[in-house]
Amino acid sequence: WHVWLNEISGRDGTERIGSPVVYLAFVPLLFPWLVYFCLGAWEAARQTFARAADDDRNRGIGLCLLLIIIPLAVCLLHKDKSDRYLLPLVGPAAILAAYGLIETWNAQGKLKPVGRILLGVQWVLLAGAGVAAPLIAAATGVRAAGAPPGEHLIRWPLAAVVALVCAAVLTAGLIAMTRRPSPRWALGCSVLVMLCVHAAYLRGYSRSTPARSGFRPLAEAIAAAHPNAQIYATGDYRKRPSVEFSIYLNRPTRWAALKDLASMPPSGVPKVAILVDRKGSGSASQFLSNGWETFRTFQRGGDRWDVLVRPAAPERAGESDR
């Protein structure tokens, strides 16, 4: 019960993102199918409120809409807000977007009037994302949020290649659409353009500072200095390092009470304590007075983090704690 309550309330969260603005990331997640998603969501809501869900398809579309609205409402009420919580909503949103795309075509396989408008809007969005955006980003030196100067998302040679490839795909799709109208051309061109754009921008983002874990340098330093150390997290309240810290160390981070860990006797393996001091109470002094040594100190998220090491006892070197 306590584990479930902590997960729901977010009391043990390492990062406190309090602004609901982060959920606006749902818009780019739907790109370039945003116009069809809006149409699909409107049709799902209209059928639901009109009580037109008289078959399995209509009931399923209404369920997809609820699978977006209800989790999003819960996320808005949750204390920890992060755009990664939106990922489970992408599946229902994709179904609604596909439903909206199907609704733009009539039974004879011809575009409805609203379909022509939406198709034109999507083609403009694809041209902007695949042709104009790479060229503008390379010309203006666009960087990832928080990246230092010089870390561009995309540079000129790659931007020119991406723009040419996307322009060729869109041109071929338009020619095919005029000869044999079908939603398959819009679907295929959108997938190819977005795969090309994503690959180019992710290549630049993966090499930028914001894409790197803030705890990776610390984990690598601990692994190099104390490869067989036992790792503990402690503090005045139950706050642990981010999960990637244990991933990079390839070992678990155990929780221990502050007083118990500070007075723990030395053993055959070194111990590393990650101490979070939010109130500036000087809790690290309890460790230093009991034979612990300061390994590193840094600030993160408004908190002071002290990394302390308890060296292994010389006479017990090579032993392990059970």
Image (spheres, grey):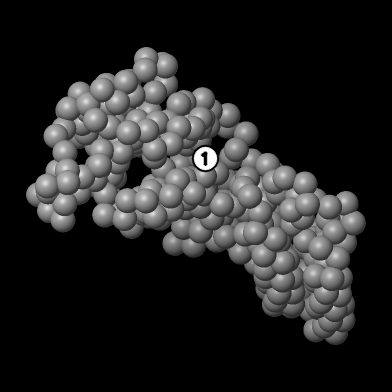
Identify the image quadrant of residue 110: bottom right
Q: Is residue 270 visible?
A: yes
Position of 182 relative to 276 (above/below): below
Element assignment for label 1? loop
Residue drawn at 46 percent across, 42 percent down: 71
Q: Horizontally, is 32 left or right of 168 in the view? A: left
Task: Give the percent coordinates (x, y) of residue 184.
Answer: 70, 77
Residue 8 against residue 231 in the figure, above or below: above
Quadrant in the picture for residue 130: bottom right
In front of the other: 253 or 307:
307
What residue is drawn where x is 66% and y is 54%? 208
| x and y, in percent, of residue 189 in the image | 74, 74
Residue sitting farthest toward the left: 322
- Badge 1 density bin: few <14, some 14–19, many ≥20, Cα 10 Å: many
Q: Residue at x 17, y 46 (%)?
A: 314
| Residue name at image x 63 percent, y 50 percent | 209
Q: Amino acid at mark 1?
A: Ser
Q: Is residue 274 left or right of residue 260?
A: right
Residue 266 sits in quarter: top left
- Most foreground residue, 84 or 321: 321
User: In the rendered picture of this protein, how many numbered marks are placed on residues?
Assistant: 1
Give the residue pinned by disc 1. 82
Extreme-front residue of the structure: 314
Q: Quadrant of the N terminus?
A: top left
Whether residue 6 is visible to the viewer of this picture, yes or no, is no
Give the camera-side residue of 32 and 294: 294
| Residue 303 percent location from the top left of the image | 46, 26
Left or right of residue 266: residue 284: right
Q: Position of residue 261 (x, y in %)?
A: 20, 31
